[in-house]
Image: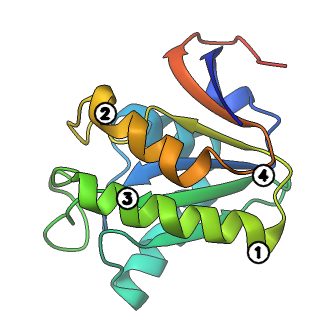
Amino acid sequence: MLKEVEGDLLLSKAAAIAHGVAPNDPFSQGLALSLREQWPALYKDFRHYCQTYHPKPGDLWTWMGADGVMVVNLFTQEGVEGHHGGKPGRASLTHVSHALKALHKLTEQEKFASLALPRLATGVGGLQWDDVKPLMLQHLGNLDIPVHIYSTYRKGVAVD
């Protein structure tokens, strides 16, 4: 059950938070930067993962913090050249679709009780919400758990 909400994704009580990234993403802007600031170990582990496994767009990588927070990194964008620096590539609807399909499968395997996501790939990724929303409905809409889409950022506002 998808529900659009307004609030601060970093304050979500969802079992897992998912967001879009690029392989070798520097986490230097948007939600990724906020996640990097909130959980520095996430970015350190992400860099190590990318350098070791060379993920491709459409894949995902899951990270769990010491505080129990689960962050699912959806590779929705083309990779950054090199191992650091540079700008993430553009997102594509194909990459988003593959990543959401993988997220659906992961959610069922891990039996997540809930998910929270932003308007995936519409910020740094450059896609239009009207194009991405149908993919989110297709891949996540039939999950029997709450799926909160944070459509409007409200700093410091928690969603029930």
Q: Which residue is mark 4?
A: 69
Which label lies toward us, 3 or 4?
3
User: Foreground residue, 55 or 81?
Assistant: 55
Q: Between tags 3 and 2, which lies in front?
A: 3
Viewed as shown, does residue 89 lie left or right of 158? Answer: left
Which of marks 4 and 2 precedes in the sequence? 4
**Front residue of 105 and 160:** 105
* Residue tagged 1: 109
Please say if the residues under marks 1 and 4 sit with CB atoms less than 8 Å apart.
no
Q: Secondary structure at mark 1?
A: helix
Asked if disc 2 and disc 4 are in contact, CB closer than 8 Å, the reply is no
Quadrant the N terminus occupies? top right
Q: Position of residue 125 (x, y in %)?
A: 25, 42
Q: Tags 2 and 1 in contact by the CB under 8 Å rule? A: no
Between the residue at mark 2 and the residue at mark 1, the CA separation in whole angstroms equals 27 Å
Q: Position of residue 53 (x, y in %)?
A: 41, 89
Q: Amino acid at mark 1?
A: Gln
As measured in the structure, the alpha-carbon distance from the residue carrying label 3 to the one carrying label 2 is: 14 Å
The local secondary structure at tag 4 comes to loop
The three-letter code of the residue at mark 2 reads Thr
- From this viewpoint, which residue is outermost toward the bottom? 52
> Of callouts 2 and 1, which one flags the residue occurring earlier in the amino acid sequence?
1
Q: Earlier in the sequence, mark 1 or mark 4?
A: 4
In this rendering, the label closer to the viewer, 1 or 4:
1
Give how far apart the Cα atoms at labels 2 and 4 are.
Answer: 24 Å
Which disc, if any, is residue 97? Answer: 3
- Is residue 27 found left or right of 63 in the rendered image? left
Q: Secondary structure at mark 2?
A: loop
Q: Residue at x 64, y 15 (%)?
A: 7
Q: Quadrant of residue 95?
A: bottom left
The answer to whether residue 2 is visible is yes
Question: Distance from label 1 to label 4 (Cα)?
Answer: 17 Å
